[in-house]
Amino acid sequence: MKWGVITFPGSLDDGDALYALREVMGQEAIALWHADERLYGVECVVLPGGFSYGDYLRCGALARFSPVMKSVARFARDGGLVLGICNGFQILCEARLLPGALTRNRSLSFICDRVALRVENASTPLTRLFSVGDVIRLPIKHGAGLFVASDEELALVEKRGQVLLRYVNAEGQATDEANPNGSLNNIAAIANETFNVFGLMPHPEHAVEADLGGEDGLKLFYSLVAEDR
């Protein structure tokens, strides 16, 4: 599978994503530049974490106007796989490729931690190697990860199964104490209506080696390359 990882001004996890894909998984992965509209025939586009354009105005608000995003929008409309991680999730929401928005953490502080997440839908390209109810652990590092949506939009996202991962405690319960940023319904990851665009606040690219805290992130990436896609 051929992957493309976009670098925006202020991206800082693009190299980590490329490392996970190339060095750990042995995938073909190329760097894409925010000012270049070409996607070079990739099969999955990754929008990495970081602070695109310094997070001015709102996180992801300026990156959505980058030339490459025109191509990403067309690619997504044609059914191409798009994965937004942390800042990438924020960009996809700003570009309206995903519902809702990411706002300041309820603590109004930056959070860096490892969190437990429960798989809510295992029938998507991003989660197909899991079972519903599986609990995984991934790192988070963000200041604006509070997922919000209107009551109507939130109800539809839940009804359609677009919630993919939810913050939970060690027992797999979605409690308020287990919610690191205050996201509505403990939402940590969502998909679009056609389940080819995905956004998650946790960082799977930082959980691909057992010696560095776990490999749960690998299973998300491998789900996207499963042969039965």
Image (cartoon, rainbow, N blue to C red):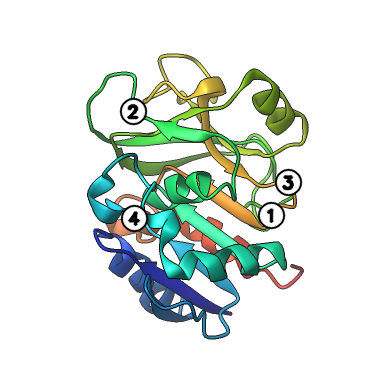
Q: How far separated are the C-alphas under marks 2 and 4?
A: 22 Å
Q: How far separated are the C-alphas under marks 4 and 1?
A: 20 Å
- Judged by depth in the image, the label closer to the viewer, 3 or 1, is 3
Mark number displayed over residue 128: 1
Q: Report which quarter residue 23 is drawn in.
A: bottom left
Q: Which residue is mark 3?
A: 193
Q: Secondary structure at mark 4?
A: helix
Q: How far separated are the C-alphas under marks 4 and 3?
A: 27 Å
Residue 119 placement (x, y as % from top left): 61, 38
- Judged by depth in the image, the label closer to the viewer, 4 or 3, is 3
Which badge, 2 or 3, is on the more N-terminal residue?
2
Residue 220 placement (x, y as % from top left): 54, 56
Specify the amino acid type for callout 1.
Answer: Arg
> Looking at the image, can residue 173 be seen?
no
Q: Which residue is mark 2?
A: 104
> Looking at the image, can residue 85 be seen?
yes
Specify the amino acid type for callout 3.
Answer: Glu
Residue 99 placement (x, y as % from top left): 60, 39
Specify the amino acid type for callout 2.
Answer: Arg
Residues under numbered marks 3 and 1 in contact, where contact means CB atoms less than 8 Å apart:
no
Q: Secondary structure at mark 3?
A: loop
Name the residue rendered at 34%, 34% in the picture.
144
Name the residue rendered at 36%, 52% in the picture.
62
Q: Secondary structure at mark 2?
A: loop
Which badge, 2 or 4, is on the more N-terminal residue?
2
Which badge, 1 or 2, is on the more N-terminal residue?
2
